[in-house]
Amino acid sequence: MRQRLFCFALLFVFLSTAATANVTLPAIIGSNMVLQRQSEVVLWGKATHNARVTVTTSWNKREYTVKAGADGAWKVKVQTPAAGGPYEITISDGTAITLRNILIGEVWICSGQSNMEMPVKGFRNQPILHSTDILMEADNPQVRLFHVKRRISRVPQFTCEGSWEVSDAESVSTFSAVGYQFAKMLQEKLQVPVGVIETSWGGTVIEAWMNEKSLQPFAGEIKIPAVTDTLKLHQNDPTGLYNGMVAPLIGYGIRGTIWYQGESNRTRPAQYRRLMPAMVNAWRSVWDCGEFPFYYVQIAPYEYAGDHELGGKIREAQLKALEEIPNAGMAVTMDVGEEKCIHPADKTIVSKRLLYWALARTYGMKGIPHEGPVYKSMKVSADTVNLSFDHAANGLTTFGKPLTDFEVAGADKVFHPAHAWITRGGVAVKSEEVEEPVAVRYAFKDWVVGNLFNTEGLPASSFRTDEW
């Protein structure tokens, strides 16, 4: 009897150990995922403390071994091959977990606020242009989607809520219209698997997406809630979304990031110009994979309430930030805004303009235009100002429409509507009300339909020659 009880006790201990020995993985590491091709990608998780964890990859039958720390955390770097799949990964600390249907290809993060979050099915009473056609063509096992569910946290989280899904009409309908279409077109162009990770939340400020270290230079301007703060969590708490929706992804192998945010920082344009490079630097630092590409969307025109120049100023801040962020690009959307809806329906053109940057700069495809005209300099001749532009080697165009939304001011700093026309060297501007012009502005207001393009069809950003 005593021997039988002893055997039962040993069996109980064995079963209990086996039940608790399973490796725990963050949600981002799972079946159906895409791993970045031809790189060392990081896999990580938790096990029992000091456990021996083995990771076996089916593409090369290689076994990696790592010892979990005292807290059970472990991390291992795995070499990936050229694009392909499906493959499997087995992870074991005595009890095996097998991840299946894994592809090797290109991985991008898409993040920001509501214009990135806006799903293919649209928001209520706010459609996505051609959404049914997009869904009809969504079946593509070579595109994989991971949607990070909303979460705010005072401290960085190990995991998030979400799972990798194969692209089809159902999974695509609730996924970012910008992020999905970028991934779909990239996959079709490169002919390799593409995974896209969406982490976005509408109506959020950039400092919510930044970590504590990156916000230290802004300590006198932005207050970070203490970990012990008992006030209700809010999506705009500084570091709150970074901790809950970015931290669980850190280290996952990516090629780059696309970003669409800025509306919620509209009233603080000068500060945003400094915050944006700080955020990008912080993300690159914690990912520890170099200066990965960061392509972002300049917010579209919209009729905001209040100061009607703030739209121009935040777009200017985004344009100027480009000078301070290496390996970055900006998609201009001056021609596709909507006066009464902050969420423009045409997300296809936004995705395409981000894709142009990626194809030209990240994937080195020659001959693909990706930059719109950028104001370079001005020269005053009597009552006329002549403007020159970069990224307009073949000239400028309005595609047959009158050139509008230029203003001119004299020394009194009062701007007047101006007549503008395209010249061989750029754009000429004059106003009968300003005999001695000093400054020019183009589309420098909330709501406007930009109509100045280079001949490649890429629009110019709003701009001003003054700093008043």
Image (cartoon, rainbow, N blue to C red):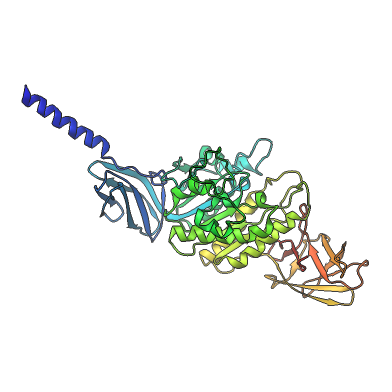
Total of numbered circles in the picture? 0
In front of the other: 214 or 309: 214
Q: Is residue 310 left or right of residue 142?
A: right
In the rendered view, tell whether residue 162 sits above or below residue 3: below
Does residue 337 appear in the picture of this structure?
A: yes
Q: Is residue 387 left or right of residue 324?
A: right
Q: Quadrant of the C terminus?
A: bottom right
Q: Is residue 159 left or right of residue 206?
A: left
Measuring from the top left, give residue 118's x and y in whole percent.
61, 43
Please tell me which residue is depicted at 87% across the width and 73% down the height of the picture. Answer: 384
Please tell me which residue is depicted at 80% across the width and 61% down the height of the picture. Answer: 400
Q: Quadrant of the N terminus?
A: top left
Measuring from the top left, give residue 423's x and y in whole percent.
80, 72
Measuring from the top left, give residue 142's x and y in whole percent.
45, 49
In the rendered view, tell whether residue 160 sits above or below residue 362: above
Q: Residue furthest top?
A: 1
Measuring from the top left, give residue 37's x and y in whole percent.
40, 58
In front of the other: 40 or 143: 40
Does residue 187 appear in the picture of this structure?
A: no
